[in-house]
């Protein structure tokens, strides 16, 4: 399953917001520059994250963006769903309003889709991994990598 750059860049944006001391607002331009990402694309993503109540914005000279909740309370499933809309391992999968998965091949030739069980399990595994990973965990992991890289460069 491939996620688009929306998910990749959006997660990187959320990690950068999670890194800010005491939830200090940071400009999108600063994040785009530090992550080497296109500012115009980041503006599009942050709008989606704001609509999902994951990010807040503050105007003014000391304004910018912050996480809407503590980093430990925001999981990656929320982030990716806000950016990607649907998380599906195959194009034939569709979410139903009840939260179930529907396969467009399910009723082909009067028999059930032979692969639905497999792809449902794949989707469940991806969702479980995303929901079990928070912004805080990614910040801690990224900061650990930075420290390790810094220590290796000085040894």
Image (tube, helix red, strand yellow):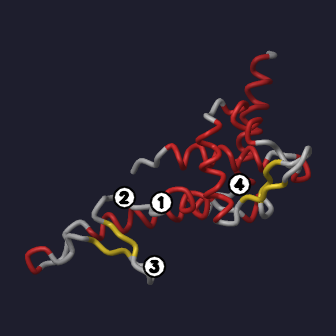
Residue placed under numbered mark 1 in the picture: 126
Badge 4: residue crowd in 10 Å (few <14, some 14–19, many ≥20): many
Q: Is residue 3 above or below residue 73?
A: above
The kind of secondary structure element at disc 2 is loop
Residue placed under numbered mark 4 in the picture: 135
Residue placed under numbered mark 2 in the picture: 89
The Cα–Cα distance between marks 4 and 1, rounded to whole angstroms, is: 16 Å
Q: Quadrant of residue 48?
A: bottom right
- Tell which circle, 2 or 3, labels the residue nearer the N-terminal end: 2
- Tell which circle, 4 or 2, labels the residue nearer the N-terminal end: 2
Give the residue at x 27% y 69%: 116
The Cα–Cα distance between marks 1 and 3, rounded to whole angstroms, is: 15 Å
Residue placed under numbered mark 3 in the picture: 99
The kind of secondary structure element at disc 3 is loop
- Residue 15, image x, y percentages: 71, 47
- Tell which circle, 1 or 3, labels the residue nearer the N-terminal end: 3
Q: Is residue 130 above or below residue 152?
A: below
Looking at the image, do the residues carrying marks 2 and 1 touch, with CB atoms under 8 Å apart? yes
Badge 2: residue crowd in 10 Å (few <14, some 14–19, many ≥20): some
Give the residue at x 70% y 62%: 54
């Amino acid at each position: 399953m491939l996620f688009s750059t929306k998910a990749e860049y959006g997660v990187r944006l959320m990690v950068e917001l999670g890194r800010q001391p005491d939830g200090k607002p940071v400009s999108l331009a600063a994040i785009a520059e530090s992550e080497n990402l296109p500012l115009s694309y980041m503006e599009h993503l942050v709008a989606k994250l704001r609509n999902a109540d994951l990010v807040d914005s503050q105007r003014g000279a000391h304004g910018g963006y912050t996480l809407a909740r503590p980093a430990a309370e925001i999981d990656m499933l929320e982030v990716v769903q806000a950016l990607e809309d649907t998380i599906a391992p195959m194009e034939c999968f569709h979410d139903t309003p009840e939260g179930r998965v529907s396969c467009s091949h399910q009723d082909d030739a009067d028999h059930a889709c032979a692969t639905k069980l497999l792809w449902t399990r794949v989707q469940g595994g991806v969702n479980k991994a995303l929901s079990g990973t928070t912004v805080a965990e990614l910040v801690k992991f990224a900061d650990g990598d930075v420290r390790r890289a810094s220590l290796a460069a000085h040894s």
